[in-house]
Amino acid sequence: MGDVFVTSIGEQRVAAFNGIEGLTFNLNGDSFVGATPGASLAASLDSFMAPSDWAIPAQWQFSLKPLHMASRHGTSLERGKGLFHLASPQGWAASFHTQGVEVAYNPSEGPFTFTAGAVHEPDSLLGTQAKGIFGSLAANTFHIGSRWQTDLGQWSISASGELGLVSPTVAGSSVIDRIDTLATNTFTLEAARDFNNGNTIRFSLSQPLRVAAGSMKYTFANGSQDGLVTGQSHSASLTPSGRQLDFTTALGVPLGEGELSLGLTMSTQPGHRKGSDSEVAVFTAYQARW
């Protein structure tokens, strides 16, 4: 959600009352809201460690760890605890969580993979929580996506994109009147190469999950008249002011019975906040099978 609440509600004046008749205080809306952090390091680490391809098994597989590359919506939203994962020799795969499910299909081991999923957030809206006069938020998200991958010389080139529809629910709020259905999107461009010594290098450009369209109606108290509180209604876009882009370089090196992975990510306009300083994150991981 980025800085949408700060740039909308935060710019409004709010009237506050106490027990003394006729005494009114005017507060800034930014006293009640703050910017959401955007894509977390945990989500970035999940994407860093996710399998870069999908090998269709010769027979049905059941596992407690993912058997295919999770969607960006899947790694960005809280899906609860993972239950189990499965994959079929026909190119189907599925992941089941306590708050969501995701299905992937790779027809005939071709260059395209298609994904679809649903996520239920019982106490948040795209990770944003509310309390007090703002009530509580919940959301159901349905998302679809596709990924294309091909070999170009010694390089593997891929591109993926996803679209989502979010149905928000607001309960017990004296401020938020309604939140429209939100449209979300995310994309990734990637180039990877395997070397003869077993090393792998990967470059990627990605945009984390972002609200592309949607608005909110809300009402703030602005005074009183004849003993009654008066209010003014507002409408605000929920599209953030900026666009976060992640530039990642990753190196995989064989080590022992597994692989050591090193990654460096630079994020511009983190949290989709326009004008915010760039951030740098370093990742290290080791994966092995026994």
Image (cartoon, rainbow, N blue to C red):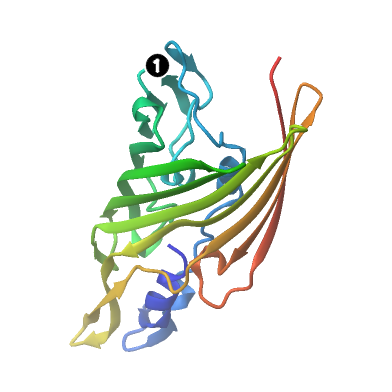
The residue carrying mark 1 is: 89
Question: Percent position (x, y) of residue 76?
Answer: 47, 47
Question: Percent position (x, y) of residue 215?
Answer: 27, 68
Question: Percent position (x, y) of residue 47?
Answer: 56, 43
Residue 153 quadrant: top right
Most extreme residue toward the right is 256
Please give left or right for residue 69 compared with residue 177 in the image: right
In this rendered view, identify the residue nearer to me: 283 or 196. 196
Q: Which amino acid type is shown beneath numbered disc 1? A: Pro
Give above or below for 83 relative to 280: above
Residue visible at 55% across and 46% down in the picture: 43
Give above or below for 290 relative to 114: above
Mark 1 element type: loop
Question: Percent position (x, y) of residue 209?
Answer: 44, 55
Most extreme residue toward the top is 59
Screen quadrant of the N terminus:
bottom left
Residue visible at 53% across and 24% down in the picture: 65
**Total marks drawn?**
1
Q: Residues within 10 Å of mark 1 (few under 14, many from 20)?
A: some
